[in-house]
Image (cartoon, rainbow, N blue to C red):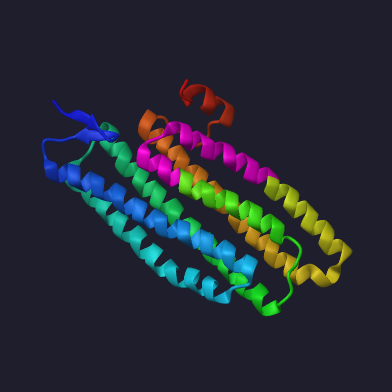
Amino acid sequence: MPTELDGHTDHISQQFNNELNEIKTHLMEMGGLVEQQVENAVQAIIDADSGKADEVLESDHTINSMEISIDEECARILARRQPAASDLRLVISVTKAITDLERIGDEATKVAHQAIALAEDGAAPKGYVEIRHIGEQVSKMVHDSLDAFARLDVDQALTVVKADKRVDAEYATAMRALVTFMMEDPRSISRVLNVMWSLRSLERIGDHSRNIAQYVIYLVKGKDVRHTGLTEMVERFKSD
């Protein structure tokens, strides 16, 4: 009789076990690169470091290639093994998570482009404090969502979902303040728009991290919570 191991079935076929473990491992490898991308992008814009921004842009090709490779691995498992129950949820969750990771990478490259533009402009505009603060929060969300996936930790996944609510609120506050600042000083419009686009990308990174956290809940609990409110999620799935 098969037994549960690390969230999926321990099969008689060791090769099947290896395939399932490999897609999780490759997901984490991709996640590690994306996490570094986000950190470098935030640092590039704060330090006006075009070199670090270029590193982010160069790594985007690697992220895209990894998404395609892992997706192909998952497709082969579906075709050859026809997994069911928790195994099927694992494969589905990995395919969805790599899509969100690739999109996080895309948003990091957008921040890197804004960093280059601001570095060329030379002036430090209003909004760097907000970029630093929101950037630190979403970087942690990326890390925590991947850690929750690796450990199948529903409580940590819920923590990421909660963090996304805070980021959304801070983003809205920052955008209002920046609009006011532009109205008061029209000469700042170009620079502040760069900051606003960067903040928008960071907010989107938080959204994609939340998505990955929700896949953890789906994987562990078998429930799709993408359209479930935070309060209901916590009440249903938080450990006592």
Asked if residue 149 lies in the magenta stretch, the reply is yes
209 vs 141, nearest the viewer: 141
Residue 225 seen by the camera: no
Left or right of 41 in this view: 120: right
Give the percent coordinates (x, y) of residue 28: 36, 51
Residue 44, quarter of picture: bottom right
Q: Residue at x 50, y 34 (%)?
A: 158
Left or right of 15 in this view: 218: right
Give the percent coordinates (x, y) of residue 218: 40, 34
Q: Residue at x 80, y 58 (%)?
A: 179
Left or right of 117 in this view: 207: left
The main secondary structure of the magenta stretch is helix
Residue 194, quarter of picture: bottom right
Which residues make up the magenta segment?
Answer: 145-169
Where does the N terminus fall, quadrant-wise? top left
196 vs 143, nearest the viewer: 143
> Furthest residue to the right?
184
Residue 226 seen by the camera: yes
Left or right of 106 in this view: 114: right
